[in-house]
């Protein structure tokens, strides 16, 4: 029973941690990403027409949207240079995205007094050795022009634009080391996009309407566009966590099955030791079915008791970790210092059912052995 309880407890705790990791990923990305993102089905950009704007603006559940131009560019500052992901947005993005809550230094602004400003990820700023308060050094962004094949490469093959760094943010490593926010008009001019956009980022009034808004956008914009909700924008990462959770569940279930063999051996030894008592029961009128049921019920008692104890212990450990954060991630650069935990009733139901079935099934063979006792051999 102890082995069943420990295995059940381990499954509950591990699955709860994976749930916590999924929730952590969603919370981190939700602070940066839009609730709905519209992209071209083919190619990396599309022409932003009045019909597309009307289609988006015609959905009443949408609170606001922002047009986005996003591409890689080279950034130079003093003697340093780095390739970063330039994301051109308008002020609507800053108003709705809460980027200012993640600022390390400076301020969250993109334009003012006819000057363009940039907000850099902390990793990009570190690579550039950026000094926000210095007016002596300018920051330039360089993007290749479209040139015809075979044309010689020259200084005119790239476009350069100067911009003033306004702030440094820190959200998550991927964003910190790659992203730089600039005004939409600045990105449009630098990359010569004209009316083209790489995405439309949509924010809804009520998150309960997310699925409905997604369907309406897909209908309004047609088959040339892909409409992604927050989970679909990071489907690869979330799917990897789910797959890992599944394989951990299978692995720990096998380990628990091995522990359940203790029940098998215990009941088998009991069937051998109690052959005389079983013969007495047969002599008193017991049937083979009754003997099997006795041993199966004993296995069920062990299974349900061990499973119940394990579920309670697992719940207790998960709640303690959730409340007091006793077990840390062991990394200084981690987003959270302790392993996140999220309890789900479906996990308890799945674990309880699977462990109980495994334990009861291991009781079947000893019950079969007990039901085949030879009466004459043990009562002679």
Image (cartoon, grey):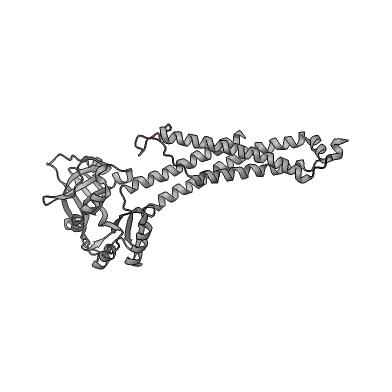
Residue 104 on the magenta segment:
no
The quadrant the N terminus occupies is top right
Q: Quadrant of residue 257?
A: top right
Residue drawn at x 33%, y 56% is: 36
Residue drawn at x 49%, y 42% is: 15
Which residue is at the far right? Answer: 380
The image shows residue 157 at horizontal and vertical percentages of 19, 58
Q: Classify residue 338 as left or right of residue 6.
A: left
> How many marks on residues?
0
The image shows residue 269 at horizontal and vertical percentages of 73, 35
Q: Determine whether 47 is above or below 272 in the image.
A: below
Of residues 78 and 279, which is closer to you in this image?
279
- Whether residue 41 is visible: no
Of residues 243 and 16, which is closer to you in this image?
16
Q: Quadrant of residue 283?
A: top right
The image shows residue 278 at horizontal and vertical percentages of 79, 38
Residue range in magenta is 329-333
Q: Determine whether 151 is above or below 352 in the image.
A: below
Q: Classify residue 267 as left or right of residue 334.
A: right
């Amino acid at each position: 029973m102890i082995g069943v309880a420990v295995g059940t407890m381990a499954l509950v705790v591990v699955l709860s941690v994976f749930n916590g990791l999924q929730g952590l990923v969603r919370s981190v990305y939700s602070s940066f990403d839009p609730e709905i993102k519209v992209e071209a089905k083919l190619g990396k950009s599309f022409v932003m027409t009045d019909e597309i704007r009307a289609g988006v603006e015609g959905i009443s559940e949408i609170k606001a949207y922002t047009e986005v131009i996003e591409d890689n560019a080279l950034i130079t500052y003093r003697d340093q240079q780095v390739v970063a992901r330039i994301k051109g947005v308008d002020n609507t993005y800053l108003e709705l995205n809460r980027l200012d809550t993640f600022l390390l230094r400076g301020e969250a602004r993109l334009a003012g007094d006819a000057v363009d400003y940039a907000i850099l990820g902390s990793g990009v700023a570190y690579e550039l050795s950026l000094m926000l308060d210095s007016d002596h050094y300018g920051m330039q962004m360089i993007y290749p022009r479209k040139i015809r094949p075979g044309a010689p490469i020259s200084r005119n093959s790239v476009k350069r634009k100067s911009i003033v760094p306004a702030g440094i943010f820190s959200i998550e490593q991927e964003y910190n080391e790659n992203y730089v926010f600039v005004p939409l008009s600045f990105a449009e001019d630098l990359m010569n996009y004209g009316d083209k956009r790489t995405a439309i980022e949509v924010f809804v009034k009520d998150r309960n309407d997310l699925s409905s808004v997604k369907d309406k956008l897909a209908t309004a914009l047609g088959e040339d566009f892909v409409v992604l909700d927050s989970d679909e924008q990071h489907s690869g990462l979330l799917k990897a966590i789910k797959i890992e959770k599944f394989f951990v569940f299978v692995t720990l279930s096998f380990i628990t099955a091995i522990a359940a063999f203790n029940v098998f051996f215990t009941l088998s030894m009991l069937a051998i030791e109690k052959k005389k008592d079983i013969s007495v029961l047969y002599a008193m009128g017991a049937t083979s079915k009754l003997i099997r049921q006795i041993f199966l019920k004993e296995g069920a008692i062990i299974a349900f008791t061990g499973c119940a104890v394990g579920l309670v212990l697992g719940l207790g450990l998960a709640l303690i970790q959730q409340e007091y954060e006793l077990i840390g991630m062991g990394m200084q650069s981690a987003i959270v210092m302790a392993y996140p935990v999220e309890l789900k009733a479906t996990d308890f139901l799945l674990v309880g059912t699977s462990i109980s079935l495994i334990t009861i099934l291991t009781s079947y063979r000893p019950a079969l052995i007990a039901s085949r006792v030879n009466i004459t051999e043990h009562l002679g």
